[in-house]
């Protein structure tokens, strides 16, 4: 394997590992007015960013089984953070969208994550942060396009 690609892969695994650890989310949730179960945080933020969104698409985005995500979205609905309704394009699909309370909660998560990342990158220059964000966004777009291509190839 190319050393640069291996180093990138190792770094991505470390980042995903950090983001999957309980400590960052526990730290975030301890400051929240309405603490959430850890597994619900990424779903709430994704629904806020991408909603209205169906459960299958959401499950694909977070890499979880759709039955698990369906139960978790139902929990967010019970908490008044999202509403579920018939899809805008396909009425058979139930889509989730954040409520005003859900948006406030997602905004609070964003502020807390910004503080955390600011702390982690305190010695980085603004240019370094912008470069990293630009390159990661480019990689994320390429990854998402790859998934779409693979799915379309599988259905042909």
Image (spheres, rainbow, N blue to C red):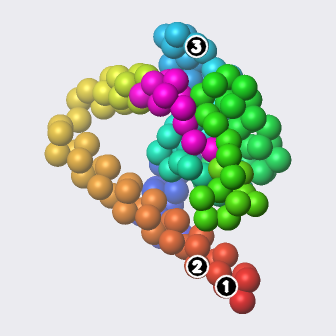
- Which one is earlier in the sequence, the residue at label 3 or at label 1? 3
Dots 1, 2 in contact, CB < 8 A: yes
State the image coordinates of residue 103 (x, y, percent, origin top left).
Answer: 47, 30
State the image coordinates of residue 16 (x, y, percent, origin top left).
Answer: 56, 43
Residue 138 can be seen in this image: yes
Q: Quadrant of the N terminus?
A: bottom right
Q: Element type at marker 1?
A: helix
Q: Residue at x 55, y 16 (%)?
A: 29
Residue 54 can be seen in this image: no
Q: Which residue is mark 2?
A: 149
151 lies left or right of 25: right
Disc 3 crowd, CA 10 A, few/some/many (<14, 14-19, 20+): few
Span highlighted in magenta in the image? 96-107
| Residue placed most toward the observer, 66 or 138 | 66
| Residue placed most toward the observer, 4 or 84 | 84
State the image coordinates of residue 133 (x, y, percent, origin top left).
Answer: 32, 49
User: Disc 1 to disc 2, how far (Cα)?
Assistant: 6 Å
Q: Which residue is mark 1?
A: 153
Q: Residue 105 colored magenta?
A: yes
Q: Quadrant of the C terminus?
A: bottom right
Q: Residue 26 colored magenta?
A: no
């Amino acid at each position: 394997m190319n050393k640069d690609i291996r180093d990138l892969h190792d770094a991505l695994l470390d980042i995903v590992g950090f983001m999957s650890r309980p400590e960052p989310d526990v730290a975030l949730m301890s400051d929240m007015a309405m603490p959430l179960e850890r597994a619900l945080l990424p779903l709430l933020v994704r629904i806020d960013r991408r909603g209205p969104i169906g459960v299958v698409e959401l499950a694909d985005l977070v890499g979880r089984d759709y039955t698990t995500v369906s139960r978790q979205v139902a929990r967010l609905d019970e908490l008044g953070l999202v509403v579920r309704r018939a899809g805008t394009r396909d009425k058979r699909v139930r889509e989730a969208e954040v409520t005003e309370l859900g948006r406030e909660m997602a905004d609070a998560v964003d502020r807390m994550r910004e503080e955390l990342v600011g702390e982690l990158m305190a010695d980085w220059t603004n240019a370094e942060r912008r470069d990293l964000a630009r390159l990661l966004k480019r990689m994320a777009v390429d990854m998402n396009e790859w998934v779409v291509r693979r799915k379309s190839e599988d259905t042909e």
